[in-house]
Image: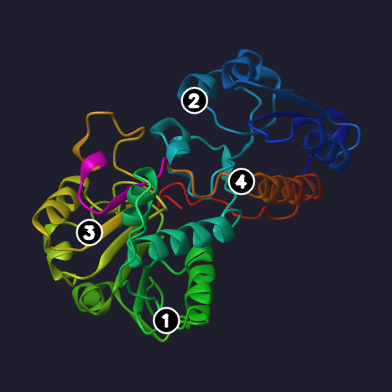
Amino acid sequence: MSSNPHSLVVFVSGLSDPESQMAQIRATVPGAVCRYFEKRSELEAHIEEAEVVAGSISPQGLAKAKRLKWVQSWAAGPDEALFPEMIESPVILTSCKGNGAIPLAEHAMMLMLMLNRNALRWIRAQAERRWDRFFHDELNGLTCGIIGLGNSGQDLALKAKAFHMRVIGIRRSNQPTPNVDEQFPRERLHEFLAQSDFVVVTAPRTPETIGMLGEAELRAMKPTAYLITFSRGGIADDNAVLKALNEGWIAGAGLDVQGIEPLPPDHPLWTAPNTIITPHNGATTNKTRQRGVDIFCDNLQRYVAGQPLRNVVDKKAGY
């Protein structure tokens, strides 16, 4: 697909540094009309003009977008953009797959360290000004089991190896993965879970992965093991996770994603034993968005030149 830059209209929302990032976008396609909107509602009020949108779009906005050919989602996992009308439309959807791999892997390591060393006990003691020394564990020699060996999973494998951990993983393909000691097919999920001291979910949310970890799977984990989730909610069933935590099937959890977001204030996961909850915040860094802008600018150059775009989403498959 090619486009004349002088007739190209690009609408953008959701930047972390609009002034410098819009300057970068405009420099990528000189002559094009590039407009920034603080809010999606403002963008969609004028969306009839746009050929390209970088940001989120609603079904109502899509219905009005008569000239729209391509949407670039800032998300790595574009499931929120895959509403039925988008799936059925001819509009190309691309993602920012890989932009948050580094901070997500860092977030997982933070949660693993906090749970492994019972950091919540230190935090409680500090709040009470109480000197509380105790024996705690270390990651050295433990097994990190990663569900999903894409960009985030591979970066996490590298970091886990730096902590002298054994790394195992589940991947759709049997393609070898750096820093992974053993790969398991989906059919051996329970065996994989039984070997893991930490089960880290990095897989995208797709029809294939929704509900992947239910009661039977959580019962297959060691009672000393921890669950870490940071890709998308719903892959681990919230009710099953809550039951596993309350009944001691697993030792604890670090949850950056939940099936319902924002998590309601009265949700029992907030007070589940030995659980750390963060508000789907692991990749919310300025560098994550900048890497996304870099992906978009590369795609803009490809779009104008008629070259294949990066990270095109298979709208039927969900990733």
Nearer the viewer's eye, disc 1 or disc 3?
1
| Residue that badge 2 annotates | 58
Q: Earlier in the sequence, mark 1 or mark 3?
A: 1
Q: Which residues are magenta?
A: 270-279
Label 4 element class: loop
| Residue 284 located left or right of residue 131 | right
Classify 10 Å Cα crowding around label 2: few (below 14), some (14-19), many (20 and above): some
Q: Say which amino acid is labelled 3.
A: Leu
Classify 10 Å Cα crowding around label 1: few (below 14), some (14-19), many (20 and above): many
| Residue that badge 3 annotates | 213
Q: Earlier in the sequence, mark 4 or mark 2?
A: 2
Label 3 to label 2, Cα distance in Å? 30 Å
Compare residues 196 and 90 and report the one nearer the observer.
196
Q: Say which amino acid is labelled 2.
A: Ser
Label 1 to label 2, Cα distance in Å? 43 Å
| Residue that badge 1 annotates | 165
Q: Earlier in the sequence, mark 3 or mark 2?
A: 2
Residue with the most extreme top position: 45
Q: Earlier in the sequence, mark 3 or mark 4?
A: 3
